[in-house]
Image (cartoon, rainbow, N blue to C red):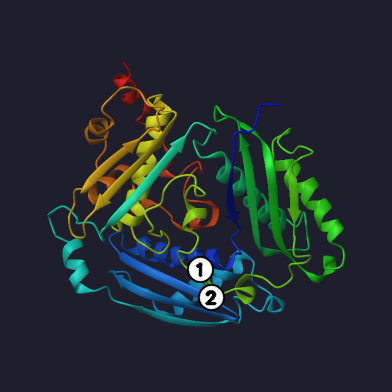
Amino acid sequence: MNEIARTFTSESVTQGHPDKVADIISDAILDAYMAQDKNSHVACETCVTTDFCMVFGEITSSAHISEEEIEKIIRDTIIEIGYDNPDLEFDGHTCKVENRLHEQSADINQGVDRGDEETGAGDQGMMFGFATNETDSLMPYPIDLARKLTNKLTELRETGEIPYLRPDGKAQVSVNYDKDGNVVSLDAVVLSTQHDDSVSDDQDKLKEDIREKLFKAVIPDGLITEDTKEHINPTGKFEIGGPHGDAGLTGRKIIVDTYGGYARHGGGAFSGKDCTKVDRSACYMARYIAKNIVASGLAEKCEIQLSYAIGVAEPTSIMVDTFGTGADVDFDKIVRENFKLTPDGIIETLGLRDTTYKQTAKYGHFGIEGLPWEKTDKAEDLKKYIK
């Protein structure tokens, strides 16, 4: 076996994690407004705790969505996630719902909505995108594997294949690399899953089910070795979970949502924000650029940074880092020549007014096939720069 040079860890969470519940609700409300008015300006935040959900934030839209309809969206989303039972102490049928959404600040809106002029950025900030040839999805291996584990865990619950599972859960993998950057093995795999009381005193059954139906289905052969540390529900049991076990807030899983800590992050969260807000849309564009650069063969790894000023259309800076794996080319020039980086240009290129956003909060914002910023349709064009 190749000698281990470094170990990197990433985590992912299921849809039933309290912070993810909040993200999914925020994006469900965004989708409802965008369905009626593609030019809606939405900044919807959500908080959840024991039998309580509140949405708050700013919305400017011509869509007509009543208080009752907002409440129905929230309840339906909570039930869809799996919180549909009073035993969970967070039940979409009966929990208290409070709506504190109001109109967007006119001071912000005047910089964003400029009639026939280019749309200005909805906020200042710096945004990062990343791609690497470690996986078929061009995502870092640790977050790619951690997300596959949580998504499969949700599937096992929803299909009833493991009938005692409840919605909350987490996965974490520590991946060993050799000096050339190749994945060697897993140093550790951690899986915590909420469950009902039928296995509270029989964690051995839960562990065996997780090994047989989850780990064997998702983790490639050979990665788990005799030296791999395994932790399944390491506290002993996990009955109390979800918003009853821990309050949830929109935007607290930004590392889970992106690259698992493998690449830098500008700090902005995604869910509940419409596509004029560059802390969401520019991150999607930066991923699109980085992925196409790697797919073209111009680099094995690529990180893009974009920065913006509120109300200003063009980015204030562009940075491309290929970590010594890139061709001898002017990447800054390549990016400027081939990609539109204003908010309007990003929205047009990626079709962001026609995207359903709730799916991103559920399954991941990057590395998910079918999302418009995951296309590699520019890769062939970029190959012309290879000398």
**Residue neighbourhood size for the residue with mark 2, other residues' Cα within 10 Å, grouped as few (<14), some (14–19), many (≥20):** many
Say what secondary structure mark 2 lies in: strand
Which mark, by number, is residue 22?
Answer: 1
The image position of residue 355, as x and y in percent, is 40, 52
The residue indicated by pointer 2 is: 48
User: Which residue type carries mark 1?
Assistant: Ala
Of residues 298 and 375, the one nearer the viewer is 298
Say what secondary structure mark 1 lies in: helix
Of residues 260 and 180, the one nearer the viewer is 180
Q: Quadrant of the N terminus?
A: top right
Residue contact at pointers 2 and 1, CB within 8 angstroms: yes
Depicted 105 relative to depicted 339: above or below = below
The quarter holding residue 237 reads bottom right
| Residue in the picture at 29% in, 56% down | 125
Q: Quadrant of the C terminus?
A: top left
Depicted 232 relative to depicted 89: above or below = above
How far is disc 2 from disc 1 in space, using C-alphas?
7 Å
User: Which residue type carries mark 2?
Assistant: Val
The image position of residue 275, as x and y in percent, is 32, 56
Relative side of 235 to 342, left or right? right
Can the viewer see residue 69?
A: no
Can the viewer see residue 53?
A: yes
Q: Earlier in the sequence, mark 2 or mark 1?
A: 1
